[in-house]
Amino acid sequence: MNWDHPQPFTLELSPSAADIDGLDHTNNAVYVQWCEKAGWAHSEALGLSLADYRRLDRAMAIRRSEYDYLLPTAAGEALVLGTWLYSTDGKLNMERRFQLLRASDGATVLRGRWQLVCIEISSGRARRMPAEFCDGYLPAVVAAHLAD
């Protein structure tokens, strides 16, 4: 597979008939849901679950998301979604990237990017990442852009 960055966290996916829209391809909203699924699975693999977020009263919330839909996919097509933590300031902000590949030929069908901010769940306000976030997430960052 021709990944944009090394060592992605991956999920194997395949659109179901229910994922197909009126244009006979996978609905764009399905890709967004898959990215959310991959983001949570990666976070859990790094040791941070939704239960940890609630216990710590902190979360990495999406501030901005963007998706480039490059090629259509069809029901039953084998796909592989990769995700990376791409950059962080180690305090409030982090970026997650996505790349969806078609397994049959390795073609990139989607690229996505989230700008994340650490929030206090109870208030919704931006708050510094707790030590557990730094310990779990920072070692996984592809291109660490840590501020001094």
Image (tube, rainbow, N blue to C red):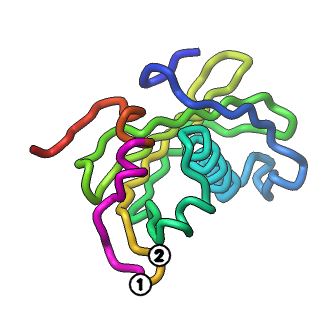
Residue 122: x and y in percent read: 47, 82
The residue drawn where x is 63% and y is 30% is 10
* Left or right side of 101 for 26: right
- Counting from the top left corner in percent of width and height, residue 31 is at 65, 49
Instruction: Give the residue at mark 2.
Output: 121
Q: Give the distance between the C-alpha atoms of the residues marked 1 and 2, in whole angstroms.
A: 6 Å
- Image location (x, y in percent) of residue 129: 33, 58
Q: Main secondary structure of the magenta part?
A: loop
The range drawn in magenta is 123-135
Q: Which residue is mark 1?
A: 123
Seen in the image, is 142 located left or right of residue 14? Answer: left
Mark 2, secondary structure of its residue: loop
The amino acid type, in three-letter code, at marker 1 is: Ser
Q: Quadrant of the N terminus?
A: top right
Q: With respect to residue 139, does 19 lie above or below?
A: below
Of 17 and 114, the residue lying toward us: 114
User: Which residue is pictured at 48% across the width and 45% down the height?
Assistant: 112
